[in-house]
């Protein structure tokens, strides 16, 4: 066996050797060495496992723990053999607990002497008596201690040689159990950086939608990543551990740092000279009639001028944000310095925003998420025309309010508007929809869907209006029930609620445990459309806030939109006796189609 004193590894040689050691499979990190030191010294395996190697799985599976210990020993031995230290390879593979196991259970000579009252005898006499009792000399335990000491020194040498900290660009399989890493990589997570971005970007239940990754594995991954934050240079936010509703807005705002990159306009910091304070087409400062000294402030002033409609403000901000980010980051110009040629280039850019990783992201990511991007992908002809119309409005506003002297969009023709056939559902379609809705299982979510179909189909409400409406907005008048949906063009919008719809509403309210009369004081504060209340029965594994939903609470627009889409697709598949064009119409239907049901469809 090799000399106990091991060679020193120089820094220059160590880097190359570590690289060589890491090319084969899962890499060795400090946790592997810490765990094996604990195993060799006989410390509590469960505590050591939970502290250093929980990412490998749960300690309850003893066979898995034993296989992992053997795998680590094999990895250590292989690393030693790659550096021609064959004696160390053999040493690492030894299990000190099995070295003269019988001797390991026997007392030491001092313990034997104290137990038998032989302290006054000579050591030779003590040894003779020990052999007489046990048949062997007390040397096995000492040999075991020597092996353990040599193994610990060998581990120190190996750790210096091959252990390395995880880096953000490393693939998951370099550090995470191969079975888990394969699941992550199949989901498109090809680096630890991408994994942290996914977790921070989605937050609580980030693992949902990744097959084979459940809450147990997800917790172990998060725990391990948190332990590696210093070497990764990335941190996980507190929102990862709790439902979105329990995370403060201030905590979420910290996830995306301000800077000169593709970030929400609220976090964007333009480079010097590109913020528009001295843009080429800025009007004299004394002529400006809006509270803006730069382009970002000018966009917000324009958005606020649309204060009557929240949906319009969101739409306008999105288009202004996209254009400003593109102008500065791709064109290298301030918004207030753009010319007509820049606007033409932007129209071409919208057909295929590239590089995609920089500009495009998953649908529905909120602005607090690091995964947010201004685009989801190429824009359709209609979307590009809408963007041009909105941006033309932006620059007209800035010119008319003395911020700019001219608009680069002024002389540009809008993209041609493609004439689309009117999208609507016929009376026959509506009858199929009603029959299919009646066949749905009696769940809380389906009760909401059935009522929402009638609500939008009979009143023509927009999806956003239906979701935002509260029972407080319903009034009883001499002519019947009406719903107030806000103010348009200076007038209060009053939507009549037909008697058949009121019957649907009463049943739906009762299903939520509310009073069937929508104007009853007990319903104060309740939304017209509420959350599913039977989640605790149908999906008991769901987060606490879903299993204990408030009957008066509302829902997100996306929740109802997705439910409609799923319903119409299922309805089309069930219409096996319908002509192909009818099935196609049902599958393509949306909430906006319900608003244009032809006359007599609701009779």
Image (cartoon, grey):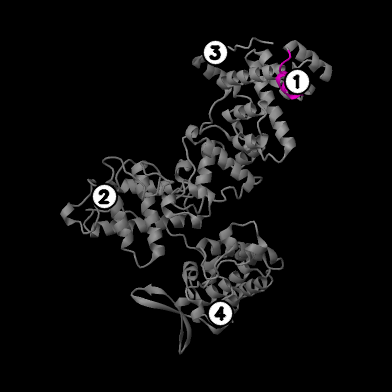
Residue identifier under label 2: 294
The label on residue 515 is 4
Tell me if mark 2 has few (under 14), some (14-19) or many (20+) residues whose alpha carbon lies within 10 angstroms of its own. many
Q: In the figure, 89 relative to 41: above or below?
A: above
Residue with the mark numbered 3 = 8
Of callouts 4 and 1, which one flags the residue occurring earlier in the amino acid sequence? 1
Give the label, 4 or 2, closer to the camera. Answer: 4
- Of circles 4 and 1, the one toward us is 1
**CA–CA distance in space, label 4 to label 2:** 53 Å
Q: CA distance from mark 1 to mark 3?
A: 29 Å
Is 165 or 195 nearer to us in this picture?
165
Can residue 423 be seen here? The reply is no
Q: Secondary structure at mark 3?
A: loop
Where does residue 389 sit, x and y in percent of width and height? 37, 58
State the quadrant of the C terminus: bottom right
Q: Marks 2 and 3: CB-CB under 8 Å?
A: no
Q: Residues within 10 Å of mark 1 (few under 14, many from 20)?
A: some
Q: Image height check: is 351 above or below 107? A: below
Between residue 311 and residue 183, name the one nearer to us: 183
On the image, which quarter does residue 80 sit in? top right
Label 4, residues with CA under 10 Å away: few <14, some 14-19, many ≥20: some
Task: Name the element at disc 1.
Answer: loop
Distance from Cα at disc 2 to Cα at disc 3: 60 Å
Q: Which residues are magenta?
A: 106-121
Label 1 sits on residue: 99
């Amino acid at each position: 066996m090799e000399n106990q004193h091991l060679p020193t590894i120089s820094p220059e040689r160590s880097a190359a050797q570590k690289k060589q050691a890491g090319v084969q499979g899962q890499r060795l990190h400090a946790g592997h060495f810490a765990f094996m030191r604990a195993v060799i010294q006989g410390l509590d395996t469960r505590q050591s496992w939970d502290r250093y190697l929980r990412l490998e799985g749960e300690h309850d599976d003893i066979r898995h723990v034993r296989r992992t210990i053997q795998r680590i020993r094999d990895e250590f031995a292989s690393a030693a053999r790659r550096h021609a230290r064959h004696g160390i390879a053999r040493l690492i593979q030894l299990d000190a607990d099995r070295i003269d196991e019988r001797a390991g259970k026997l007392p030491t000579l001092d313990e034997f002497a104290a137990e038998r009252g032989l302290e006054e005898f000579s050591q030779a006499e003590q040894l003779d008596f020990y052999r007489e009792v046990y048949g062997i000399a007390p040397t096995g335990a000492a040999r075991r201690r020597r092996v353990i000491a040599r193994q610990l020194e060998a581990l120190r040498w190996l750790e210096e040689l091959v252990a390395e900290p995880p880096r953000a660009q490393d693939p998951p399989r370099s550090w995470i159990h191969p079975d888990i890493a394969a699941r992550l990589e199949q989901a498109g997570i090809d680096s630890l950086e991408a994994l942290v971005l996914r977790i921070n970007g989605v937050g609580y239940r980030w693992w949902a939608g990744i097959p084979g990754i459940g809450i147990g594995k997800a917790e172990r991954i998060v725990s391990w990543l948190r332990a590696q934050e210093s070497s990764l240079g990335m941190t996980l936010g507190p929102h990862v551990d709790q439902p979105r509703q329990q995370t403060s807005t201030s905590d979420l705002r910290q996830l995306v740092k301000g800077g000169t990159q593709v970030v929400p306009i609220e976090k964007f910091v333009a480079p010097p000279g590109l913020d528009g304070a001295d843009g080429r087409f800025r009007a004299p400062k004394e002529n400006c009639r809006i509270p803006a000294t730069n382009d970002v402030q000018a966009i917000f002033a324009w958005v606020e001028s649309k204060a009557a409609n929240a949906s319009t403000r969101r739409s306008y901000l999105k288009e202004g944000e996209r254009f400003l980010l593109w102008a500065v980051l791709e064109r290298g110009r301030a918004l207030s310095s753009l010319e007509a040629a820049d606007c033409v280039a932007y129209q071409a850019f919208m057909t295929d925003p590239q590089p995609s990783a920089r500009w495009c992201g998953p649908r529905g990511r909120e602005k607090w998420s690091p995964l947010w991007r201004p685009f989801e992908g190429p824009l359709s002809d209609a979307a590009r025309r809408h963007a041009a119309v909105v941006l033309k409005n932006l620059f007209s506003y800035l010119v008319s309010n003395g911020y700019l002297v001219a608009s680069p969009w002024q002389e540009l023709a809008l993209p041609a508007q493609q004439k689309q056939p009117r999208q609507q559902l016929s009376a026959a379609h509506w009858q199929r929809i009603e029959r299919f809705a009646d066949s749905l299982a009696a769940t809380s979510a389906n009760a909401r869907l059935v009522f929402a179909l009638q609500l939008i189909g009979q009143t023509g409400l927009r999806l956003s209006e239906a979701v935002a409406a509260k029972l407080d907005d319903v009034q009883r008048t001499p002519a019947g029930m009406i719903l107030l949906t806000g103010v348009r063009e200076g007038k209060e919008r009053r939507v009549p609620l037909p008697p058949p719809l009121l019957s649907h509403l009463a049943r739906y309210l009762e299903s939520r445990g509310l009073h069937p009369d929508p104007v009853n004081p007990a319903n104060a504060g309740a939304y017209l459309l509420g959350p599913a209340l039977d989640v605790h029965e149908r999906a008991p594994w769901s987060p606490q806030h879903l299993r204990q939903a408030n009957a008066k609470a509302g829902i997100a627009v996306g929740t109802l939109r997705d439910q409609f889409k799923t319903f119409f697709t299922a309805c089309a598949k069930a219409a096996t006796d319908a002509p192909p064009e009818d099935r196609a119409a049902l599958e393509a239907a949306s909430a906006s189609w319900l608003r244009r049901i032809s006359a007599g469809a609701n009779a």
